[in-house]
Image: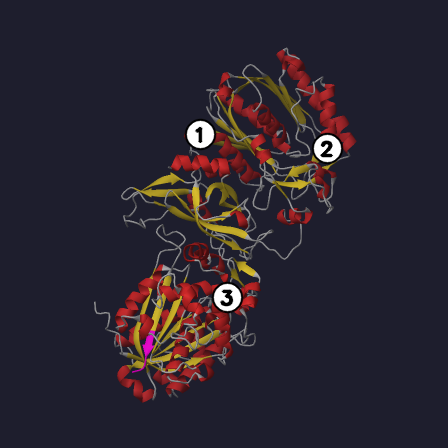
Amino acid sequence: MIGITSYGAYIPPTRLALGAIGGRKAKPGGPEKAVAWNDEDAITMAVAAAVACLSGLDRGEVDGLLFASTTHPFREKQAAALIARALDLRRDLRTADHSGSLRAGTAALRAACDAVKAGSSHNVLVIASDCRMGAPGSALEMNVGDGAVAFLVGERDVIASLDDAHTVSDEILDVWRSDGEEFSHSWEDRFVVQEGYTPRIVEAVRGLLEKSGTSADDYARVALYAPEKRSHTSAARALGIREETLQPALFGQLGNTGVAFAPLQLAAALESVSPGDRLLVASYGDGAEALSFSIGDAIEKVGEREGVSANLARRRAVDGYDSYLKARGMSTTEWQGGTDPGLSATIHFRERDDDLSLRGQKCRECGAVQFPAQRVCETCFRKDAFDPIRLSDKTAKVVTYTFDYFFPNPNPPTVVSIVEVEGARVHLQIVDCKPEDVALHMPVEFVFRRIHEVGGRPNYYWKGRPLSTAEAGSAQEASS
Amino acid sequence: VSRESIRDKVAIVGAGCCKFGENWDQSPSDMIVDAAYEAYADAGIDEPQRQIEAVFTGSLYTTKGPLECSDALKLFNVPVTMVSNYCATGTDAFRCGVMSIAAGMYDTVLVVGYDKPKDRGVSGPSVMMDGVRDLPKTPAGWFSFCAATYFAKYGAGREDLARIAVKNHHNGTLAPKSFLKREISVEEALKGRMISWPFGLYDCAAQTDGAAAVVLTRAELAKSFSDAPIMVKGVTLRSGPNPQKDPTNDFLSWKPTGWAAEDVYAQAGITDPAKEIDIAQVHDCFTLTELLSYEDLGFCEKGSAKEHIADGHFELTGDLPVNTDGGLKTFGHPTGATGVRMLYENVTQLRGQAGKRQVKGASTALSHNIGGHPTACAIAIVGLP
C-alpha cells in the first residue's frame, strides 16, 4: 500500500469579511476568507502545514519534499530547499517545486506516490500552498483565500492509499498571471466555467470512475476544486455526487486557496472518514486530475493532527479592508519596510542553520543550550564542543516583553519579547497576540515567518505564537 | 594590580561643549571646532598645533574615521585615535586619553566626542537591519525589556518614570547649551505618544547633534594650564554579555554598570557612593535606564528607586542631584559626544560655574555611560584636587 501516512494544514487566522472588500462596512457573521498577514506567504504557510503534518514523527525519515504553489516569492530559486531548511530535514533530500498550474497540488501528490511506488523514495513530504492575489475590488479578490496543506506519502501506516488516478491536460487561457504581475487575471467567468472548469473536471472524474470500475456512490467523500461556489455545486450535480458526500468547499470561510484548494478539502475529509471508506479528490488547472483513495486502519492510529477544522476554529477578524490592503502591501502609507540597501547573501548563507532551521547548540561540557551558534560556550567557556539542537519544535516561555510602536508594522505595536527555550534566551517577535494578552512566563511556540524585506526579497525567521490554553496545559505537563 | 594607580595622576584643565540640538547649519567639523576651541581657551592653550600631543576622538555615526577630527582642527603629525563603543564612546575616548598620560606617553592630549545623527533624515535612531535574526531592534525596544520584569517585582510604574522626565526637563531649562528648554508635568509626560511600552515620547532621550571636548594633562603640569584643574579619580570600562542572550539575566538591572561601578569606586577609594558622590551625570537614554542606574551605581538599594524619586533625592535640591544639565533627555544625545559632555558638566559644577543649576559644595562627581544592548558601561569619577 502506498499513499498518505500523515497530514497537516495551515490557514491564516486572519479572516477578511467579504462584505468589507472595497471598503464597505461588513456585518459580523457574514462570509469571509482567510488572508495571509504581512509576515506570511506561500513559504511560511507551507512550513506551518508541514510542521503540523510531521508532528510526533521522525523528521529524519523524510527523504523527499515536493512543493506546489503558483505564488512562490522567487521566480528563480527553489522553494522546496528553503522549506526543507526551515524544517531542519536531512541533507540527502530530493526536492522539487511544482508550479505554474492550479493543478500543481494534486500533480505533486501523484508524483510523490509514483516515486514511492517506484522505490526511489520512501517518505515524501508534499506541500501545497498558495497566496494568490486578485486585484483590489475584483471578483477574483472575493473568491481567493490563502492556505496550505501538507501530506506525508509513504508505504508504512498508510491512512489513505492511492487506488487510481486520471489526468487530462488541456490548453486554455482562462486564469493566468504573466511574469512580473502581482494579480491574477481571469477571462469572462461564463467562458471559464462552460469551456474550462466544468467539462474538464467532469472528464477527469468520469475517466477515473471508468478506469477503476467505481461509481460516484462508492465514495464516502468527494473533494472538488471549483473556481467559485456556483460552479462547485453544478459540477457535483453533473457528476451525480450526492450532497451528503460532497466535501464542503469552504467558500465563505476560507476561499479558493489555489493549488491547495482541493488538497485542503482532502485533508478536511480525512478528519471524518473511517477505515474502508473511499475518497475522491479532483483538481483543475490547464486540464484536470482526479485521484481516488481507500482509507486504511492506520487512520485510527494517526492521532490528532492539526488539520482544517482546528485551523478554521482559530480565527481573528481583520478590522477592515484598509488594514488588509496595508498588510498585503497594496496601500500607499507612511509605513515602509526599511531603508537598508540589502542583506549580505553570504551572511544569509552562513546563518541558515540559525535563522532558517532555528538550530541552537548544546555544550558537551556543561550542557548549556545557546542560540545562535558560537565558538566559545557562554557558560563554561569551553571552545568548539557543541551538538546541534533543534529549537523550532520546542516550547518557549516569555522572560520579558515590550510593545514596539517604532518598528515598521502595518498594525503597530509589534509585540517583542525575550523568550527562554531549553535554557537559551532568544529575542523574538510574538504574533497572533494582542498586547493585553502578553504575560511574563507565557508559553509560546515557534512559527516560521517573514521577518522583513530588506534587499527587496523576503527574509525569513521565526516568531513566537502563544500556545492555546489547552496546548499550554499539555506543554506544562510535558515539562514538569 | 593596583586599582588606585590612576587616581590623581591626570587632570582636566580645559572643557568645551558646543550648543546641542538639531544643528542643521553646522557640519561635524563646525561643532568639533566650537567644542575644542572652547576647551583650548579654558586651558589657556593658544598654540594647539604645538601643545596637543595626541587626540582621542569618538563618534558612532561618522564614516570618515579619525580624519574628521584631525582635519577639522588641523592637528597633523600627531597620533589621532578613533574610539567606537556605542553610547559609551565618549567616556571610553576619555579613558584612552587618561591612560595615555598615566602611561607617560604624552603630557597633554585632547579628547573630542561628537556625533551628527540629524543628517540622516530620521527623527529617532534607525531601526537596525544588520542581519536576519537580530531584528527588530530599536534602542527603545531593547531598553524597555527591564520594564515588565522590574514593575512586576518592585511595583514601580510609568508615573515613576515620568517624574524622572519632569526632573530632567526642569534641569535642561537651566543649562544654556541644552536642546530642550521646556518644563513638563507628570500628566504631560504620561500622555506622550507610545514608542515602546512603557516608554512614551517623554521617556526617550532627545537625539541631537553635538560635540564636546576636554584637554587632559599630567597632574604636575595642571597648574601651568588652569587655576581650577579637576582631577581624575578613576575611570573604567566593563564589557557585558548581550542581555538578550544572557541566560542568567534577570532583567532587573544592567550587569555592566554594577561591574564598572565596583571597579571605579575601588580606583577612587569610594566605599559608600550614596554619601561620597556629590553629583552624577547618569546615562538616561530612557527614563528607566536612569532609574536602574540609581540602583546599579549604589546610590540607593535595589528596588528603592521609586521612593527616592518621590522624595526628590535626585533633584537639584536633593541629596544626590543627577543629570544636573538635563541629561541625555533634554541636553541632547549625540552618541559619541555624550560622555564628554557629562565631563564638561561635572567640571563646570565642581568649579562652581554652573549658574542657576549650580549644586553647592560638590567635590566629587560621577559620569556614567552605557552602550550597546547594553553590553558595555564606562564610568568616570572626577573631583577637586
Check the image and report above or below for A237 versus B310: above
Give the left or right position of residue A342, taking residue B300 as reference.
right
Identity of the amino acid at label 3?
A: Ala
* Residue marked by disc 3: B162
Q: Which residues are magenta?
A: B381-385
Identified at 39% across, 63% down, the residue is B304
Share a chain, discs 2 and 3?
Answer: no
Task: Tell me the chief SS of the magenta region.
Answer: strand
Identity of the amino acid at label 1?
A: Gly
Which chain does the residue under circle 1 lie in? A
Q: In terms of depth relative to the viewer, which is nearer, B349 or B376?
A: B349
Q: Is residue A19 magenta?
A: no
Which chain does the residue under circle 3 lie in? B
Q: Secondary structure at mark 2?
A: loop
Q: In terms of depth relative to the viewer, which is nearer, B24 or A411?
A: A411
* Residue marked by disc 1: A56
